[in-house]
Image (cartoon, coloured by chain):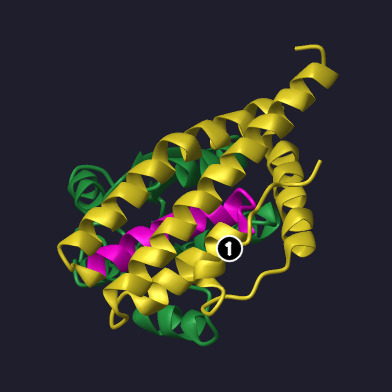
Chain colours: A green, B yellow
Amino acid sequence: MTTVALVEDNADNRLLVRVLIGHLYDVREYASGADALDAFSRELPDLVLLDISLPGISGLDVLARIRTDTRLARLPVVAITAHAAQGERARFMAAGFDEYVSKPIVDETLLLGAIAAALARAHD
Amino acid sequence: MQPAEPLDHSDAQHTSSDPSGDAEAATGALERLRRFGGNGFAREMSAIFAEQAPEQLAAARAAAARDDREAVAHAAHGLRGSCAQLGAVHAARLCKALETQAPSGDLPAIMALLAGLEHATASHLEWLGRELDESNLERGQ
């Protein structure tokens, strides 16, 4: 089963994503970027769903570490964030995210579509 | 039944509010949670919010007390996502105002926003509790 690492500090958002995608993917949950990076050093997920506003290492810093680590660099990473202001999407994509999903999640097909698109591009 | 989202006049200068629109959005958010995972899932989300929101508010208040503006904004941002997902529209609006004002706003205004936010989240939790209890009764649970 395809593994999705979910990096999100809010327990309600972790539960929500697990309910929405848990029937399709093996979801591994991490409450901080440090926990996620530590886990990735042992086992690579197939895709990362990454919150931007995390305690400690921010989502953007986690992404930067992923992109500069030759072992992790090609991991598809989807931003999942409440930073929904105009222009934010472009900023996150320019930072190196593969897809962007805004919170609150009101349409589960957008989340599923973003995951599918990022995985498909990674396999091209 | 409509959510009891009180208008907090202390934040009126910072935010606009539409109580009828807020009520509709709250009902819609709850229905969406039920569609995603049923009434049990909605109850679980509500329970996490009930546990998490006071912690985030306490973190924001403690950060404000030590004048750590970045931590205030971070706590408000985290809470905003949960409020928006659970349909606490007025509370989410106050979180956004807090995020915006925290970096450079004056402390009394920030504390007033925090007080309004505490009231708004408590009101929303009461509403969620009533809605979820009623739906349990209707289902004979």
Q: Can residue A59 be found in the magenta stretch?
A: no
Please, what secondary structure does the residue beneath circle 1 have? helix
User: B98 or A58, which lies in front?
Assistant: B98
Q: Where, by quadrant of the figure, is residue B93 drawn?
A: bottom right
Q: Name the chain letter of the residue that bears numbered label 1.
A: A
Residue found 49% across the figure and 40% down from its top: B49
Q: Which residue is mark 1?
A: A114
Residue found 27% across the figure and 51% down from its top: B59
What amino acid type should be assigned to the residue bearing mark 1?
A: Ala
Left or right: B71 as drawn, with respect to B32: left
The x, y position of residue A97, in whole percent, is 41, 72
> For the residue carrying disc 1, how many other residues have a C-alpha within 10 Å: few (<14), some (14-19), or many (20+)?
many
The x, y position of residue A112, in whole percent, is 62, 54
Left or right: B115 as drawn, with respect to B73: right
User: A68 or B23, which lies in front?
Assistant: B23
Left or right: B87 as drawn, with respect to B100: right
Residue found 53% across the figure and 74% down from its top: A84
Residue numbers of the magenta segment: B70-89
Above or below B102: residue B91: above
